[in-house]
Amino acid sequence: MRAPVTAAAGDRPAPRRVGPLTQTDIVRFAGAGGDFNPLHHDPRFATSAGFAKPIAMGQLTAGLLAAWLTDWCGVENLRHYEVRFTAPLSIGDTVKLSGEVTAVESTDGGLAVATMRLTATRDGTTLVSGQALVVVAGKSEPESP
Amino acid sequence: MTDLIGTVVDRVTFDVERGKIREFARATLAEDPVHTDRELAVQCGFSDVLATGTHVVVGGHYRDQRGFVDKLGLELSRVVVGSASWHYRRALVAGDRLAGIRRVVADETRDGRKGGSLRLVTLETEFTDSRGEVAVTQREVLIERGRG
């Protein structure tokens, strides 16, 4: 097993920037995940639904944010992940994925569970806000030998 | 509209496949080689490559998107996903076989901020492995905007 990442409240893993998003990125995710709602690839349908052009699936943004998180903490340590979709990600957008450890609570066995606050933003506009619970190694005072 | 609560929306059964894990990892820009390098995954103590955090979304390939929207009495062009969550008992690994039963757990109507009403339907899917244990529980809240 891999050792869990060490984390303390206030830690911010290095953010990731993704983009500019292309129609190809959306189609790739449609093929991976199986969401073939025409809103995401058919310009005429998108217009009829009130959007200027096709928008990404919320699950694409959620997947990008989750992948950024688990690249840092290891997917085997993810216990809970939740996201709220507040604005759509569109073709041409660049999205910034970031987050912060808001609390770390010790559990039995020397490990700890970190609560993370997560966001995917475009030019300061929040597209997705989320939260996660992740098993980590807590930072502790060095013990005397 | 509480009569839909408990309704089974759909059922899916699928294998967690190495190739699909790779596709989904690439589509979401996951860089951890534990999703793509079997040898490394085994060295880390796993039986095969691990799926990414939101991998169960691939269940979409086994679902009838229009069918379930119709079943819930929703109009596809006015539906967006408001939120989603995943609760994990363990990580999914290539070779897992999952059965997911999706149920309506809440159905409510609220006033929208811009007037009109919003219908919020909460769906929960428990993904059970071949030993009958729930590995991942997914929740999604669908929002149907009122007719403009």
Image (cartoon, rainbow, N blue to C red):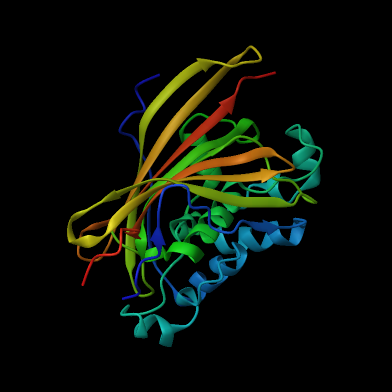
Q: Looking at the picture, tell me which residue is in the foreground, A61 or A15.
A: A15
Question: Along the horizontal axis of the image, is A89 left or right of B11?
Answer: right
Residue at 80% from the left image edge and 51% from the top image edge: A92
Q: List x then y, in percent, for residue A130.
A: 50, 42
Q: Looking at the picture, tell me which residue is in the foreground, B71 or B125.
A: B125
Residue at 40% from the left image edge and 69% from the top image edge: B16
Q: List x then y, in percent, for residue B115.
A: 64, 12
Question: Along the horizontal axis of the image, is A107 left or right of B97?
Answer: left
Query: Is A130 located above or below residue A2 in the figure?
Result: above
Count of picture labels: 0
**Quadrant of the snapshot with the C terminus of chain B:** top right
Residue at the extreme left of the image, as rendered:
A108
Residue B30 is drawn in which quadrant? bottom right
Residue at the extreme front of the image, as rendered:
A144
Q: Is residue A67 visible?
A: yes
Question: Along the horizontal axis of the image, is A96 left or right of B60?
Answer: right
Q: List x then y, in percent, for residue A25.
A: 70, 60
Q: Is residue B88 visible?
A: no
Residue at 55% from the left image edge and 21% from the top image edge: B118
Query: Is B4 located above or below residue A139 in the figure?
Result: above
Q: List x then y, in percent, for residue B2.
A: 35, 21
Residue at 63% from the left image edge and 47% from the top image edge: A37
Residue B136 is drawn in which quadrant? bottom left
Query: Is A143 located above or below residue A82 in the figure?
Result: below
Residue at the extreme bottom of the image, as rendered:
B39
**Quadrant of the snapshot with the N terminus of chain B:** top left
